[in-house]
Image (cartoon, grey):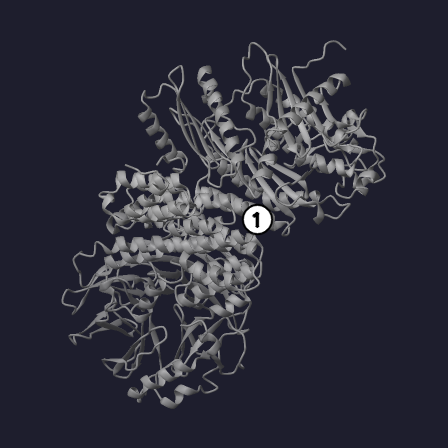
Amino acid sequence: MALTSSKKTRCMGGSGAGALSHVYLQYPPFRCNIPGSSKMMYDDGSRLLLVPSPDKMFSWPVARHTQSNSPNVTVVDNGPVLGARFSLDLTILAIQSSDCEVSFYNRESGAKFKQLCRSRRDRILGFFWTDCPTCDIVFVTTGGLELFSLAPRLDAVKLVDVRPLQVSWYLYTHESRLLLVASGMHCRTFQCYQFSAAGIIRLPKFDAGLKKLEANRKVTIGPEDVHIATMYGRLYCLQVDRLSMELNIYRFYRDAVVPQGTIPVYSETVAFSVVDGVLLVHQLASEVVLLYAIYADLKGPISAPLPLLIRGDSCFTMAGCESSTESNDILDNEDMRTLASSESNIYGENWVFANPDIILDQDHGIMWRIHLDLEAIATSSSDLPSLLEFLQRRRLDAAVAKELSMMVLCNMIMEKRPLLLISEAMDVISMAYSQFLRTRATLVIAKQPSARPQVPARHDQRKKAGKEDEKDVPVSDCNTNIIPECSDQAQKQSENVGSSKRMSNATVEQCKIAHEVVGIVEETDESAAHNKSENSTGSPLSISHNISLAVTAVSPEEMYHHVFAVIDNETDVDSSTLIAAIIQYLRSAASEKLNFPVDLQLLLIKLLTKEKRYPELMHLVRTKVLEPSKEVAKEMLQVGKSYQPVFMLGLNMLRQLSLHGDYLSEILQQGRLLEALRYARQNRVEAIPPSTFLELAAASQDIQKLASVMRFCLDFVPSFETTSEYQTYSAVLSQQKIVPA
Amino acid sequence: MSELDTSVQLCIFDTSRGQSDGQELDKILFFYPSESPFSAQLSLIGLGEGIITFTKMFSPNAPCDIIDTEKRSHVFFQPEPDIWMILVIEKRKESGELGRTRALQAILMEAHGLFTLFYGSIRALLLNSPSGDVARSCLQAFLPDYISVKRLSMLSSHSGLQERGTIQMMALDRSTALEVQSVVDLLQSWFGSGRIHHTLLLFQDLLVSTTLPPEDAAHLYTYARMRLIPAAISTSSGGHSLKKVLSRANSSSVHLKASASDITAAGQRPSPADSSNHHSQFFTPRPLQHDKWWRDNDGFLVTDAWGVDAQGMSAITPTVWLQQSSQERMKLVAYQHKQLTVVMLISVMHLAPNADGSHVLRNQVLEKASNKLNALEDRLSKEWGGINANHVPGYRYLYVDYDSRVSKASPAGKIATLTKDSLLSLDKVRSEIDIAKGRCDGSGEAQPYELETCVRTRSNAWVVVRIRGNHELYLVLERASETLLLTAEATEKFSRRHCDGIFASD
């Protein structure tokens, strides 16, 4: 996505063009006009949009921008559909058809089977597929959890385990692999399980935080008040306290659930989305969105509250049209262009916010996806280092984020922002880049043991290994987050688990954080893509994510080309400001052990020369900030024409680098003929012919010098007597009556 | 008064003054000891002037360096046109020969350099105040303090492995160097561009970084080492208060008869007294006065050597003149944290005439920079290699880079292990090289001077000298291998490892 694309976008729907927003819905939305269907379901495990019709199940893979045109159709039995989910490898569709029964349809073999819940007294509240090693599918019933695994021939499920538990309602997101079960009279006690690759982990129980206890006594907490959010690979529970208008945030750790603090809410009802790690709190009553980047610590919103807008961009509309021509029965061409006014009703009554960033408009059969408008956020933000940190953490829209980052840096320097601010910004950039390098290195390591046997049904073990690599770096830089509440013993425990995991996964960095966060054990789905075995299920979303990983970070070379060189080309730039900015960048780069591009070094030399700050230039050379290289040496020689000591330094640099030819030609230019001869002999330089030396000696009008050079040539140049030079110059010498024998 | 100590005499005179008979005393700008009878002063100057005039006939550009007699040495140095300094040192039997002439001249050069740092050039003082009173009082306020500090080194200057007037740098790795540069930039950026013109950062007695050109840096560094670094400041800072400053200032100041208006009228030399014009007397600062700098509670260094302000409320901020960079007068503000000393120079022009900008600066530094500076001190003290950081086993060396006025040498403790014989031999070799270099300078050749010498001393040590333009390397290898070849090899190795291969032999 080009940086300019959002400028081209036009605002749709009720809000006029030019209205501000930090998040928007991408127009055109996905539409399904399935006759007879009344319900849309988003299955976050398989990342499919499921729309049931009386005897069929339509499914579309959900991607980020593009919409797949024709749905997959699975023929199912006629009957009610209370819930539906595809297995993670997309072979089996499970449909909850009643309170006590789930039907399974094997898409490949066409096999059908059913499974009742264990006890007649219990009702099935829902179910989900999992990739944890102990089971494949979990039923959540009012009486607890029932864990089933698929029979080898995929024609039945077998009960593996039962976890009795009183369940009022539950939440599950596949992204977090976390199941949250509410129990108690007012549903205020939460019990969480994580169905991770390491097995099933039971987290400690915790109670919902309610401030005004007296008034809250009779309030029952419903599933709409609680949300599981995965942000930057960490798991959080968000719980609304309606009476005190606050949102309590808990973070899940392996051995604890730790309150992170509260943020205020401004609406009776709120909904949540997470886009690229950023928490969006939709204040439904006031129809505005607040954005929070919950990373190191709980800060205020990163931007002012602004409404959610619908935006489209012409090229997307066109693409949508073309693709939709083939599937006229589902997607109506005409409808693609405009939205009915009722459809563009933001925060409509029947909007369902699906995890993490999907919105289903049940009334109109529309699926929206929420996007961040990075440019709008960037322009409205005043805390630039934090903004850069935010931009550098983008995984979606990474190219835009990167370009914006560089633009922000450019503007900071040009506008002569306080140097301390620039310094902090440079730290952000360098740290992000070195993290990127480390991540890439870990990925390479993680890809090496790819010769593991393929386990068709359980391909997930390996997936996890890669997944964690990818995500653990962004997490590892916030070691400050280690929570004091974590008991030592618990830490040790988790460390043990962490180390065993490390052994199995053979990844480098995860040990660092393994003892810190549960969320790391399981990572977001989006990060899973680089693994081959995942490709069958991998949607474009995860692929785009994988590519984007490579581009947010700004390399030193890019810093030169897109920031410093750009500023240098501006006409009215204060050199000393630019020098200071470069020094700040080099400092941050050095502390992250990044290399300095030669071009940047040359630019620094140029600027220092312009300011006549030669002593500082020399100091930088001596401390190896300006590293010895041919380019730097040449530049120093050039600069040295107006300041001799710099010239000497440049000359010595050539010598140190053993660039004999360049060194010789320089000292010959200075007329240091005999020294050049000595040097040539010492270092066995044969590129320069004797005639060069002889000509120079003759030109110096110093007959003694000429004689010395002749002597040298006679002694060290094989068969010099036979050359024409010998004839010429011995003639010159004999005129002066000095003839070397 | 009993016998006058004449083991060290120093006089400064202006040959352009007192031309007519009976006016000879006008030539004399300074004489030490000041109690010497005028007859003795005049006879020394007469001798000096006579020799200078005589030798000028043969060598107009470099008339005379030294008169060596049985009992005394007269060292000549001409710091400014027509201004001469003569240092007379009595030879004592026990200390044997005096050091080489250049080393003694370097003392005079340093004295003059420091003098101009604080007062401007002698010629400028004479031009502003033709009577010579200002120049005399300034010299009188400065040189006796200097002599009392340097007396010992004048009498025995067998320090062939030291070079006066050069800077000893702290060895920094790349990222620390950048860190330092970044802190310096931040400091300068916080106080508006141009407010802090230059900074000089020292760790203990080593220079960490400076934005000054080499010569000014060398002078300021020399002063900082003498008076500002933690080891040099007064330790009695405990109950120090402004009142104390005031009382000390009044008791120890050197007053001048010329009125303040006289001096300011001359324009070029506004004095600290501008801000207190109603003061009828001009206060001549004594920058080298012993025990006159304290570390204030907030980490800033204060001194009353420059006097106190009109209200007697606070000490006047010292000022310095930069010679090489801008010919501008700067206020000197120094901050110290543990072993780190930051000397900041603020342009006087950027300050309102009556406001002492350093107060604003002090608050800002404390508010914004102290954390950074403290962290930097931490980092530097971790990186500092100890007093023997520069020691290279097996070598006793001196490496001087006259371009940047930087020298690096074996630590003093290691040099002390050399035999006296080796040091004397080195001294002799060096004085011969000094003469050779002097000749070369005179010849005006464009090519850089190059030299390689290997001398075997009586006690079988090797003295190696290599000169490449403005870079010089002196090595003393005791108990070294026996052959010339091995010595040359050892020198090459040293050059490669410690001098970036500058002294490689072709």
Give left or right: position of A642 versus B28.
left
Residue shown at 36% from the left, 51% from the top = A254
Q: Secondary structure at mark 1?
A: helix
Residue closest to the eye, B203 or B418: B418
Q: Position of residue B117 (x, y in %)?
A: 66, 36
- Image quadrant where residue B299 sits: top right
- Image quadrant where residue B280 sits: top right
Give left or right: position of A83 versus B374.
left
Q: Is residue B381 visible?
A: yes
Quarter holding the N terminus of chain B is top right
Q: Position of residue A733 (x, y in %)?
A: 34, 42
Residue closest to the eye, A115 or B221: B221
Give left or right: position of B222 versus B274.
left
Q: Which residue is mark 1?
A: B186
Residue shown at 33% from the left, 44% from the top = A658
Residue shown at 48% from the left, 78% from the top = A346
Residue shown at 36% from the left, 34% from the top = B505
Quarter holding the C terminus of chain B is top left
What amino acid does circle 1 point to? Leu
> Disc 1 sits on a residue from what chain?
B
Q: Position of residue A183 (x, y in %)?
A: 40, 60
Q: Is residue A296 visible?
A: no
Q: Position of residue B408 (x, y in %)?
A: 47, 31
